[in-house]
Amino acid sequence: MTDTLTIRRVSASPQAYIPLEVLRSGTPTYAKLVDISKCIGCKGCEVACKEWNDLGIEPTANFGSYQSHQDLSPNTWLLMRFNEVEIDGSLNWLIKKDACLHCEDPGCLFACPAPGAIVQYTNGIVDFNQENCIGCQYCVSGCPFDIPRFDPNTRKVSKCNMCVDRVESGLEPACVKTCPTNAISWGSKSDMLALAEQKIETLRKRGYEKASVYNPAGVGGTHMMYVVPHGDHLEDYSLPSDPTASPAPMTALGFLKRVGAYLMGFGLLGTLVHFLAYGPERLDEHEEPRA
Amino acid sequence: MNDQLLSRFSFFERILHWLVGITFLLLLMTGLAFAYPALFWMTAVLGGAESARVLHPWCGIVFGLGMAAMVGIWLRDMFLSSSDWEWLGAVKYYATRQSTRVPPAGKYNAGQKMFFWVQGVLAILFVISGVALWFPDVSGATVVQWMRLLHYAATLGGGLFLILHIYLGTVAYPGTARAMIDGTVTARWARHHHPRWYKEQTGS
């Protein structure tokens, strides 16, 4: 349990884009595995999250769903979403544990302009440091899962931090601890991937032939993974089928910024060179008027 | 006669110029700070990172209104005539100080007119993309990403033109900057740089 809070990546810094192979020094990374088929919808995890992170109660109203709140908020980092979907002629109650997935390639961190406002530890956890946050909300646009939430009063953005303070002390996150059916497992990423394979095997024997693990490659894999019974209905679970940490405009922006830095530098240099070549223009005392 | 002073810019024009100039410089510095982590310290010009993020859009509003007023007062002087196109064709002689080979300019030469049009178009792009970035929850993630690209591209264009504008207006052509300070230029300067305007002003 040593070395859990060594920082691997820092937003708006040269460390943000260092390839993982270089950053990794063989330290284990953690992962949560959410087995949707075992969730009974008790929302104990929501309560545990609120309690451990001291997030306070948010009033809600019945909006025709079993869901507790309509959306995540700066004080609601975990929301169990309940989607009612018809699959093969029968009603299915699809549950998604909506919270930060802790991407291996975090789109939020890449989008962030404030040095140190978002960090990724070597153990895989992506964490927001509110004291460095400037409230621009670029992380919200960078997240392919629509997770970070902006608080207009504090002008800071918040999200699930995987109970980093518990993990640092060798404990599992609060939601894992409280789950009564062991629908959420906690361990090293490789152990959780192996466990996911077992669970998928079991689900397939039970007739869920399209069961799959959700660990999308477009964000380099995630540190919260799902075992999805209906793996061919990802969108119905509100899980994007092809999320990316580097959407086209952001890749173009990164390229243009590099080119732009040279152009502005050469622009300044160019005026200096021109000045050295031609100097200040001196008007001839006896110049003949033209035109 | 050559030491005679000609009035070039009114008090209102000078106020507008510096309003737009100062806000643009503040916007450029804080904007570059947000674009380049190595320049993040420049957020200090608007009181640090968090307040720079709050004040940048408000500065942008003042800048946008100033630009709109500038377009309003200068637009009719800025349309390019046929001699302006000849001037643009001869810009290399202008840049290499062979002024006898450059067609005589009126109150504004074609380069200054082009600067007006480029900055005018960029200001529209700045304001559109800036408003979209100011209200990201209304814009949505994809629009924010494209508007960041557009906002930066406008910054790059505006920044490059600003370098040129300051260089030409100060050290390259002594006697020019005072037009935006006390509002006057010397008759000799006017006769050299803007012969047709000089003629209109002096009748000689």
Image (tube, rainbow, N blue to C red):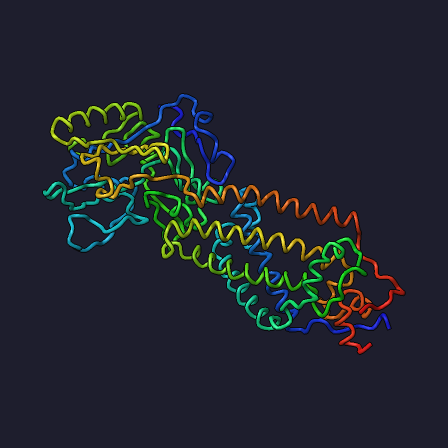
Q: Compared with residue B145, is residue A227 higher up or lower down, i.e. above or below?
A: above
Q: In percent of the image, x 73 and y 63: which residue is there?
A: B177
Camera-side residue: A265 or B28? A265
Identity of the residue furthest to the top in this view: A26
Residue found farthest to the left: A90
In this image, A281 relative to A83: left or right?
Answer: right
Residue B12 picture quarter: bottom right
Residue that appears at 36% across and 35% down? A218
Of residue A85 and residue B22, the one placed in the foreground of this image is A85
Percent coordinates x, y for residue A127 in the rendering = 38, 38
Q: Quadrant of residue A123?
A: top left
Quadrant, the C terminus of chain A? bottom right
Residue that extends furthest to the bottom in the rendered view of this protein = B203
On screen, residue B67 versus residue B201, left or right, reads left
Q: Position of residue A7 (x, y in %)?
A: 44, 31
What is the x, y in percent for residue A271? 71, 49
Q: Position of residue A151 (x, y in %)?
A: 36, 52
Residue drawn at 50 percent across, 38 percent down:
A13
Q: Does residue B77 lie above or below B89 as drawn? A: below
How many marks are shown on the rendered structure?
0
Q: Is residue A97 left or right of residue B9?
A: left
Which image quarter holds the N terminus of chain A?
A: top left
